[in-house]
Each structure stands twice: as structure tokens, then as C-alpha cells.
Image (tube, rainbow, N blue to C red):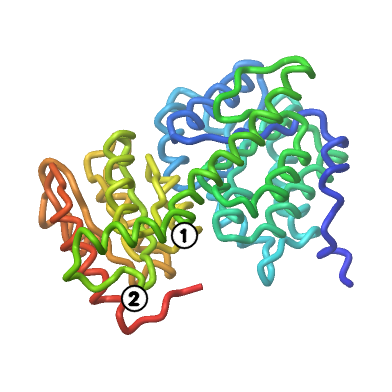
Amino acid sequence: MDSDSVQPAIASSAQTICNHFVRFYEQDKTILDAVNRFVSEGVENGEAAVVVGTAYHLDQLRQKWREVPAEQVTLLDAENTLSQFMRNGRPVRHLFRNVIGNVLQHAAKVGNGKTRVYGEMVALLWAEGNQDATLELEGFWNELSSSHEFQLLCAYPMGGFDQHAHGPAFQRICSAHSHVHPVCGVPQDVNDSDSINRYIAGLEQKAKALESGIPRYMQGDVTETRHRQYPNDTPVTDQPPLQVLVVDDDLETAKALGRLLRSFGHGVHISHSGADAHMQAALAIPDLILLDVAMPQVDGYAVARDLRTLPALANAVLIAFSGSIDAGKARAAGFDSWLEKPIGPGDIEKVLAMVRKRTVDRPRQE
């Protein structure tokens, strides 16, 4: 076997790096604020910074760092950087060391010899369902610490760990890091706090998996109840449930839509930001996406254009919703239709019928 493709011992690799942090998050603002603090603190101390992020996150961070000397912070697109050392769905060790090693060498010359790195490449691999590559890449970072001095912060949306089967890999990800920041964790500076945060992060993953699993376990009861309420409808059990992604920064609205869709027997995934929507869409490959166009930071039109670049979503139905919709912008962004708030069961019925017409003769992608 090629030594470049051998998966490293992830759990033990974490012990070779003193400052390899991982942060799990639910909302973009949380991780953007954390990255801003992480990088800004280093810059103030004369350190260089390397940020390998999604296009959306890079745009948001550029706005925060307008006063930061450009030469002190290197911004790299995560997908483009991945393409430089990924082969056949796996990271290649020597290519990774060449690509990232050169970046770190340059950064060390710009700063005081110390470098802070923030990376989202592992999160992208996880979102694609490539668990092996995610764990390998975490290990490669740890190996690189033996020849380069840097602090590394990784981040994952907690929504990507919503299945019970994710548990073992989730624990291995935590084991690959020296410090773990769960969604509800507090800043830590002692080992006891780190142990507590690791435990909390594990509980959060299990809770997310349970939250996702309950609708599936209850689907038989929901289907029976719905058929009693709508006896003239085609029984839901005659057709496979749809996968629906709801994207809205308003938590209560998103939850309400989720409850309504689950009452129709469908699988629901909820996201509260554009970047998380991208990752969840890559994970779930939804048949239907309900997207609020009035979100802060990046509006739903921009998010829609981004989602339409994913090949797996070529056949997905994309529906905009808001208090007011610009029809021209909606069409240009790739929306199939739109709804104006408030949204009721009748509106959802019509949208689901639209999706059924599109998917009736098309097998679901695996």
C-alpha cells in the first residue's frame, strides 16, 4: 500500500501537537466571532495568520479585517486548496505537506515566526460524507506540527453530526485535537475544563442524532394520523418521504416549518445560515429547499446561487420565502417558486405537490 494513503493513528496523533483546537457550532456568527478573536489576538502579538475557509466565510472575515495588514493574513479558498492535494477522494500526504508546508513557511517569514491557522477543509470533507478523508486530514495536520510551529483551529457545524452512526467518527475527531470547544462550551484554559468540554461535545452529538432520529421513528404514527385527517389523499406510505432543508435565521420560524413538514411524514434538516446550508445540503441532498431570502449578512438570493452550484442539487426544488419577494431576483438566483409569509399548511401542500411531480419518475440519488 502507498504510504501516502495510509490513515494515521488519529487518537495518538493529537498528542504530538500542543495547540490543535476544534470548535463545533450551530450559527455562522458564533464561528466567525471565534475566528476573528483567534486571528486578531495573534496579529496583535506580531504573529502571522492563515485562514483556509469557504468563500462565504472569507468574504465575511475580510470585512472584519480591513485594518489588518494584508501581508500578515493569508486567505485561501478551502475547496481550491483541497483540490491541490486530494486524489481519488483521499488526501495525499506528500502533496499536503508541500502545499500547506509552503504556505506555513511563507507565513513564518512574515510574522514573528509564529503562525495561527484556521481551517475548514475538514468540515467540507465531512459535509461530503467523506469520513475517512476527514480523519486522515486531521492526522496530517498533527504530523505537520513536528516540522512547523503553528496553532490550528478547526470548525465543524454540529448539524453535520445528526446521525447515531456519526458517534464513533465524532469521537475520533475530538481525539485528534488537543482542545475541544462544544457548542455550549465556555472558554477553557485548564485540563479539567477541556475534559468537561469533550464530554459536552459528545452529548451534543448524541442529542443532534436523537433530534434527527425521532421523526423517522415516529413516521409510521404520523403517516397513519395524516391519512385519517386526509382520507382522500394518496397514503403517504405509497411514496417515499422527501428530504427537506429549511434555511432560516429565525429559529422559531424554522422549527415551526420543520414541525409542519414532519407532520406530512417527511425528513427535515434545519439550517440557520448560508454556509451551514451549503454543508447540510451536501450531506442531505434534499429534494426540497425552503430558503428565507431576508437573512442577515448574506441574503437568501446569494445562498440560492451558491446552492445551485452543487451538482447533487441539480434536481432539487428551491423555494424562496419572505414577507416580500423580488420575483426577478428570485428567478435569477435559481428559485423555482416563492411564498410570502405567513406560510400555512395549504402553501406547503402545493409546494410538496410540485416536488412530487418533479421526482415521480426520478430515482433518489444515493
Mark toward the viewer: 1 or 2: 2
**Nearest the eye: 156 or 80:** 156
Q: Residue furthest bottom?
A: 361
The tally of labels here is 2
Q: Which residue is mark 2?
A: 238
Callout 1: SS: helix
Residue 200 location, x and y as percent?
Answer: 65, 28
Indicate which disc, 1 or 2, sits on the residue closer to the N terminus. 2
**Distance from Cα at disc 1 to Cα at disc 2:** 22 Å
What residue type is disc 1 on? Ala
Q: Which residue is mark 1?
A: 284
**Nearest the eye: 324 or 290:** 290
Q: Does 132 sit left or right of 56 as displayed?
A: right
Q: Report the quarter where the N terminus lies.
A: bottom right
Q: Can the viewer see residue 221?
A: yes
The disc placed on residue 62 is none
Residue 190 location, x and y as percent?
Answer: 76, 15
Q: Does 13 sit left or right of 281 as displayed?
A: right
Q: Can the viewer see residue 115?
A: no
Q: Does 11 sit left or right of 96 as displayed?
A: right
